[in-house]
Image: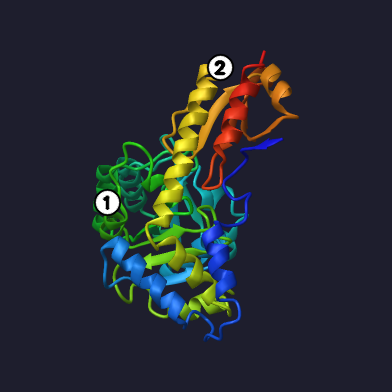
C-alpha cells in the first residue's frame, strides 16, 4: 500500500532524532528556559528578519490556534475566517469551547478576500443592533489554505490594510507554512509575514518535526502574559527543550526549507502523473496537497493499493480526493504510483 493521505504520517526527520538522542541525558531547565530554545528563537528571528520578535513553542496546531485566539479576543468577540477555515471545520469547536465564535464568510479557492472581509465589516457596523452581536475581533487565515492555495504578497497587503482600518489583528496559521514558502511562483517570505501579520506560526508537526509549532509575534508584548495563558491552556511543555531542539535543527543550514522543497518536488510529480492519466484537477494547488477527481471505477481500482483522502463526494460515485506529499515522501513511491495509475480504467 502506498500512503498519500496527509503530511504527518511519518515520525520525524532523522537529523531531529539524532539530536534528540545526542542530548537525551543532558540536564536543562524546563518550560523552554533552556539554551536550545533560545538558540532556536535566535535562528527564527534571523530567518524572519525580525530581531525583536517574541517566539513561543507549543505542541500542536489546534492548541496553538485556540491559545493565540484566546489571547487576542475579549469575551464578547469572535474571529473572522473563511467558511472552509481549519478553525471552523476541523478543530472540533476548540475556538467556540473557549468562548469565542468563529465568524465565517465565503471563501474563494480557500482564501479570504480583502473585499469580502471589508464588506462583512461594513455591513456589521451598519446594523443598528450590532452591539447585541458577537463583535469581530480578529482575522484568521491559513497559508497554505485547506485547498492548498496560497496568498500572494499583494493579497496579504490588502488584508492587512482592511485589518488596520478596523483595528483588527491578522493571524496566519502556518501549520504547513514550509510547503507554502517553497511552492513554485510564490512571492511570500517569512520576512513578509513578519511585516504583514500581527502573529503567525511556523508549523513543525507537518514539516519534519515529531511535534511542535513556533508562534511568532513580530512586535514585543503584543499579547501581555502570553506564556501564562499558555500555561493555563495546558500548552506549556515541561520538557521544553524537546521543542527547542527540533526547531533549532529545522532552522540549521536551511533544513526547514530544504525538506519543504523536496515535498513540493514530489507533489509536482504526483500532479503530473495524475493529470497524465486522465484525473482532472479539482483545484490547481502549487503546494504539497494535490486535489483531483476520481470516478467510481478509479476509486475502486485504487482502494487496495493507494491510500489517499476523500475530500468531497461528488455525483455518480466520483469524489474529489487529496494526495499529500511530505518531507518524507520517497521518489520511488511516487514512481510506483505512476505505474499503478497506468492500470486505471
| Residue 142 in the image, given as x and y percentages of width and height | 43, 49
Question: Eyeballing the image, is 139 above or below 297?
Answer: below
Picture quarter with the C terminus = top right
| Residue 210 in the image, given as x and y percentages of width and height | 58, 61
Relative placement, left or right, of 178 versus 344 is left
Which one is nearer the viewer's eye here, 118 or 3? Answer: 3
Which one is nearer the viewer's eye here, 292 or 12? Answer: 12
User: At 53% across and 45% down in the image, what residue appears?
Assistant: 326
How many numbered dots are placed on residues in this image? 2
User: At 49% across and 77% down in the image, what residue appears?
Assistant: 229
Mark 2: few/some/many CA within 10 Å (<14, 14-19, 20+): some
Please identify, in this view, whether the residue under mark 1 or under mark 2 is nearer the observer.
Answer: 2
Q: Residue furthest right?
A: 304
**Mark positioned earlier in the residue sequence (1 or 2):** 1
Disc 2 designates what residue? 277
Question: Eyeballing the image, is 29 above or below 239?
Answer: below
| Residue 277 in the image, given as x and y percentages of width and height | 56, 17
Question: Eyeballing the image, is 241 above or below 312?
Answer: below
Q: Circle 1 sits in a helix, a strand or a loop, which is it?
A: helix
| Residue 288 in the image, given as x and y percentages of width and height | 48, 40
> What whole-number distance in Å separates the C-alpha atoms at marks 1 and 2?
43 Å
Disc 1 designates what residue? 162
Picture quarter with the N terminus = top right
Badges 1 and 2: C-beta atoms under 8 Å apart? no
Q: Is residue 217 visible?
A: no
Amino acid at each position: 500500500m502506498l500512503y498519500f493521505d496527509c503530511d504527518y504520517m511519518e515520525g520525524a526527520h532523522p537529523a531531529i532524532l539524532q539530536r534528540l538522542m545526542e542530548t537525551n541525558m543532558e540536564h536543562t531547565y524546563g518550560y523552554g528556559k533552556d539554551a536550545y530554545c533560545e538558540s532556536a528563537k535566535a535562528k527564527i528571528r534571523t530567518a524572519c528578519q525580525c530581531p525583536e520578535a517574541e517566539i513561543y513553542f507549543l505542541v500542536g496546531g489546534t492548541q496553538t490556534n485556540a491559545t493565540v485566539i484566546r489571547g487576542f479576543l475579549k469575551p464578547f468577540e469572535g474571529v473572522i475566517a473563511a467558511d472552509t477555515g481549519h478553525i471552523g471545520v476541523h478543530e472540533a469547536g476548540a475556538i467556540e469551547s473557549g468562548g469565542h465564535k468563529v465568524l465565517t464568510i465565503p471563501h474563494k479557492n480557500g482564501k479570504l478576500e480583502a473585499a469580502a472581509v471589508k464588506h462583512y465589516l461594513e455591513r456589521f457596523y451598519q446594523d443598528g443592533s450590532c452591539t447585541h452581536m458577537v463583535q469581530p475581533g480578529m482575522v484568521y487565515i491559513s497559508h497554505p489554505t485547506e485547498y492548498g492555495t496560497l496568498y500572494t504578497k499583494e493579497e496579504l497587503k490588502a488584508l492587512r490594510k482592511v485589518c488596520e482600518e478596523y483595528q483588527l489583528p491578522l493571524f496566519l496559521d502556518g501549520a504547513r507554512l514550509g510547503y507554502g514558502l517553497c511552492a513554485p511562483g510564490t512571492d511570500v517570505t517569512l520576512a513578509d509575514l513578519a511585516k504583514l501579520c500581527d502573529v503567525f506560526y511556523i508549523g513543525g508537526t507537518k514539516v519534519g518535526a515529531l511535534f511542535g509549532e513556533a508562534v511568532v509575534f513580530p512586535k514585543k508584548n503584543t499579547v501581555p502574559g502570553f506564556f501564562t495563558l499558555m500555561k493555563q491552556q495546558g500548552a506549556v511543555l515541561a520538557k521544553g527543550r524537546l521543542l527547542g531542539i527540533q526547531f533549532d535543527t529545522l532552522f540549521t543550514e536551511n533544513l526547514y526549507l530544504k525538506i519543504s522543497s523536496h515535498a513540493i518536488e514530489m507533489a509536482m510529480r504526483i500532479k503530473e502523473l495524475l493529470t497524465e492519466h486522465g484525473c482532472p484537477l479539482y483545484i490547481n494547488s502549487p503546494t504539497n496537497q494535490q486535489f483531483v477527481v476520481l470516478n467510481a471505477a478509479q476509486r475502486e481500482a485504487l482502494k487496495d493499493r493507494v491510500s489517499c483522502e476523500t475530500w468531497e463526494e461528488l455525483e455518480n460515485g466520483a469524489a474529489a480526493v487529496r494526495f499529500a506529499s511530505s518531507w518524507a515522501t520517497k521518489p520511488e513511491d511516487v514512481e510506483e504510483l505512476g505505474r499503478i495509475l497506468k492500470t486505471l480504467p
